[in-house]
Image (tube, rainbow, N blue to C red):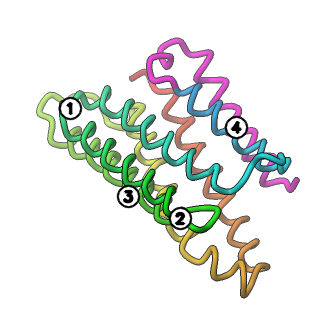
Amino acid sequence: MIILDIIYYIVIITNFTVSIIEKKLWKQLFWIYFGITIITEILFTIKASFVAARMYNYLDLFCIIYFGYIYNKEINDKYVIKVTTLLFFILGGIFIFISKTNYSIITGYLYCIFLFFISLFWFYKKISSKDQEENILNLCFFWISSSLLFWAMFYIFRMFPMYLFNKKDPEFLKEISYVFTIINIIAYSLFLRGLFCKR
């Protein structure tokens, strides 16, 4: 395991620990999200016999439901988040079912687009709100939304050449993986910053 992987695990475990210690975060169930992410990463790292790359597709579906749930509670919108979440979840499930590869890139793209939508929708709601008096930098979901936007943008570029480089230039694909580990560290650090916000 390289240094970057160790730092990544430290950051994500710190997020998990903070989400348990801070009682104000319990209603968002962040500890469930980080717990499942940690378990998935560990299983894939140790190459457990029952684990396949397809597992990440199921993690994508879980995350669509999870972030749809917490953003629906945060924004308190009756229809937009609920309908969008259901639509992306169903489409993702369909592409997993019909995919002939271990990991359905289409489902990964759908997940990224979903993160773009809910994050930007949150920014739109906050910026357009007339009742917003507090500095937006003090809001937990400012940092979480920034984290998700940042991660999704780079994840799209991570997925795009994946199968092509796996056949033609696996060494370059490894380099991309190292860069993406750095992106993960930055994204989860932004997320962690949000967990320390009062609101």
Secondary structure of the residue carrying tag 3 is helix
Label 2 sits on residue = 99
Looking at the image, the residue that sits furthest to the top is: 23
| Residue 90 on image: x %, y % | 37, 48
Q: CA distance from mark 2 to mark 3?
A: 19 Å
Residue at 46% over, 60% down: 95
Residue highlighted by disc 1 = 77
Q: Are marks 4 and 3 in contact (CB under 8 Å)?
A: no
> Residue 1, position in %: x, y?
88, 53
Q: Is residue 162 above or below residue 113?
A: below
Q: What's the residue at 83%, 46% (across, down)?
A: 48
Residue at 61% from the left image edge and 18% from the top image edge: 20
Mark 2 → mark 4, Cα distance in angstroms: 25 Å
Q: Amino acid at mark 4?
A: Ile
Relative side of 195 to 48, left or right: left
| Residue under numbered circle 4 | 38
Disc number for residue 113: 3
Residue in the foreground of this view, choosing between 31 and 168: 168
Given contact means CB atoms under 8 Å apart, are the residues at marks 1 and 4 in contact? no
Mark earlier in primary sequence (2, 3): 2
Dot 2 or dot 1: first in sequence order is 1
Q: CB atoms at circles 2 and 3 under 8 Å apart?
A: no
Q: Nearer the viewer, residue 79 or 52?
A: 52
- Secondary structure of the residue carrying numbered label 2: loop
Secondary structure of the residue carrying numbered label 1: loop
Type of the residue with mark 3 = Ile
Dot 4, how many residues are within 10 Å of its Cα: few (below 14), some (14-19), or many (20+)?
some
Q: Tag 4, which secondary structure? A: helix
> CA–CA distance between discs 1 and 3?
19 Å
What residue range appears in magenta?
1-29
Q: Nearer the viewer, mark 2 or mark 3?
A: 2
Q: Main structural element of the magenta stretch: helix, strand or loop?
A: helix
